């Protein structure tokens, strides 16, 4: 049975019209990649693929990275965002690039 929730409560709960979609992302660097190269590539990724498209990335790693991509403001990522991000990673020689389907970033179980 659905509860009759106020607009304010739905916004606080990030449900219905306030649901936010994003996607999980993972990739790998080649064995032996030095720390300076790792830092430069990740910084370049943020500057060129994430920020200009109104996205945010939360993640970590060393040779193997995983994280979450969502929009900087309230909103939803699109299939186009997934393509932009994965194409950028693939075009810069990163390996095992995987992006999940779009998921509710507040309520779905995130799988990397």
Image: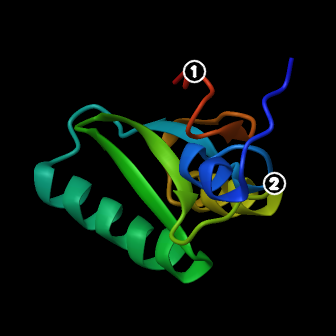
| Residue 70: percent from left, percent from top | 56, 56
| Residue 74: percent from left, percent from top | 60, 66
Question: Of residues 99 and 110, which is closer to you in this image?
Answer: 110
The residues bearing labels 2 and 1 have C-alpha atoms spaced at a distance of: 19 Å
**Residue situated furthest left in the rendering:** 35
Q: Secondary structure at mark 2?
A: helix
| Residue 27: percent from left, percent from top | 47, 38
Is residue 20 at all visible to an observer of this figure? no
Tag 2 near tag 1, CB within 8 Å: no
Residue found at x 34% / y 44%: 59
Residue found at x 63% / y 26%: 108
**Mark 2 Cα shell of 10 Å, populated few (<14), some (14-19), many (≥20):** few
Which one is closest to the eye, mark 2 or mark 1?
1
For marks 2 and 1 on the same chain, the one whose residue lies earlier in the sequence: 2
Total marks shown come to 2
Which residue matches tag 2? 79
**Residue situated furthest top in the rendering:** 1
**Residue situated furthest right in the rendering:** 1
Q: Would residue 22 appear left or right of 41 to someone viewing this image?
A: right
Q: Which mark is residue 76?
A: none
Question: Of residues 22 and 97, which is closer to you in this image?
Answer: 22
Q: Would residue 44 appear left or right of 48 to someone viewing this image?
A: left
Residue found at x 61% / y 77%: 53
Which residue matches tag 1? 109
Is residue 100 at all visible to an observer of this figure? yes
Quadrant location, the N terminus:
top right
Q: Secondary structure at mark 1?
A: loop
Residue 40 lies in quadrant:
bottom left
Q: Would residue 31 appear left or right of 5 to someone viewing this image?
A: left
Question: Of residues 40 and 65, which is closer to you in this image?
Answer: 65
């Amino acid at each position: 049975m659905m509860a009759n929730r106020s607009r304010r409560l739905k916004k606080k709960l990030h449900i219905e019209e306030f649901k936010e979609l994003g996607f999980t992302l993972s990739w790998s660097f080649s064995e032996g990649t030095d720390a300076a190269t790792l830092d430069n590539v990740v910084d370049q990724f943020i500057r060129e693929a994430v920020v200009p498209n109104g996205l945010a990335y939360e993640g970590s790693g060393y040779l193997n990275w995983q994280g979450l991509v969502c929009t900087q403001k309230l909103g939803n990522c699109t299939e186009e965002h997934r393509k932009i991000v994965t194409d950028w990673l693939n075009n810069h020689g990163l390996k095992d690039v995987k992006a999940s389907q779009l998921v509710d970033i507040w309520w779905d179980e995130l799988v990397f």
